[in-house]
Image (tube, rainbow, N blue to C red):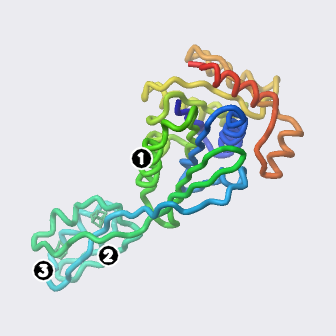
Amino acid sequence: MIIGVTGGKGGTGKSTVATALAVELAKTKKILLADMDVECPNDHLILSIKKKEIKKIEQRIPEFDLSKCSKCGICGTVCKTKAIVSIKDKEPIFIPEQCNGCGACFITCPVKAISWDKKEIGKIYSGKNYRVDFISGELKIREPVSEFIVDEIKELIEKIKKNYDFIILDTAAGTHCDVISSLDYCNNVLAITEPSPLGMHDVELIIKLCLKLKKPFEVILNRYEKENEHIITKMLKKYNKKIFARIPYKKEIMEQYSKGVPIEDESIKKITEIIKNGYN
Ligand code: SF4
Ligand code: SF4
């Protein structure tokens, strides 16, 4: 089973919960944890994993043969990411960092002055600790297309998923393309939120996304305090849902969190028991 751990906004404790669940489940099950937050991966830090590079990820980019270029300026006008600056009767200037490899310039160049080259946009890593097998991707700074890294991790998981009882995908925050791509690959989604108006607003976006993707989902309330949970329960009623689990706001958890170690708590044990018994 592939479980997506996600959150509408950063800072709700998504990675904290994903790593804690992975460690607890790994005590009795075969677990793979994939950090899909390729722009800001941090699960390896919480799990003290020494990452090993297993693959470089490349993306195609255009290469210009200026000896063939007629200086028509067309490539600059079709490039939506502004990776080509072209002025009629001048040679085009290419800015590789802004190129997403769409191919529009390659297709439209009237004199076939453009061919394909490659650039490295990121890496895939693996590691292991706490009996948790781990993979993660990392997008290079200033690279615009993180989907390629997310797709590569999914391809890798596809090859090895039969070896695991549970695969946990710790997604990026928000509802952008990477998150959609990760959640679409899951069987179930656990949306992590906190009892605040912002937490309520952002987890509702995740709920709407799960409904669109037709993915079963549950909401875990992190930093739970009795007096504030109504903020989330009221919104969940609209979707005929209740809070699936609560992780309390308490000193012991905060201390573990600030030490950067996987949190251990009764609430995490309870959630893993429900997962092991098949909650959907
Ligand atoms: S491949 Fe697409 S994004 Fe890259 S330079 Fe050409 S038109 Fe622009
Ligand atoms: S479209 Fe081709 S010919 Fe025209 S400016 Fe670009 S590279 Fe040169």
Spatial distance from mark 3 to mark 1, Cα to Cα? 41 Å
- Horizontal side of residue 257 vs 162, given as left or right: right
Q: Kindly identify which residue carries mark 3.
A: 70
Question: Does the residue at mark 3 contact the one at mark 1 (Cβ under 8 Å)?
Answer: no
Residue 68 picture location, percent across and down: 13, 81
* Alpha carbons under labels 3 and 2: distance apart: 16 Å
* Residue farthest along the bottom direction in this orientation: 67
Q: Is residue 149 visible?
A: yes
**Which residue is label 2 attached to?**
94
**What kind of residue is marked 2?**
Phe
Q: Quadrant of residue 144?
A: bottom left
Estimate the x, y position of residue 244 in percent, counting from the top left.
Answer: 67, 21
Q: Which mark is residue 155?
A: 1
Question: Is the C-beta separation of discs 1 and 2 under 8 Å?
Answer: no
Give 20 or 253, whichever is nearer the viewer: 20
For the residue with label 2, is its CB less than 8 Å from the closest atom of ligand 1? yes
Mark 1 is surrounded, within 10 Å at the Cα level, by few (under 14), some (14 to 19) or many (20 or more) other residues, namely few
Q: Name the residue furthest right.
A: 251
Could you say which is closer to the camera, residue 177 or residue 150?
150
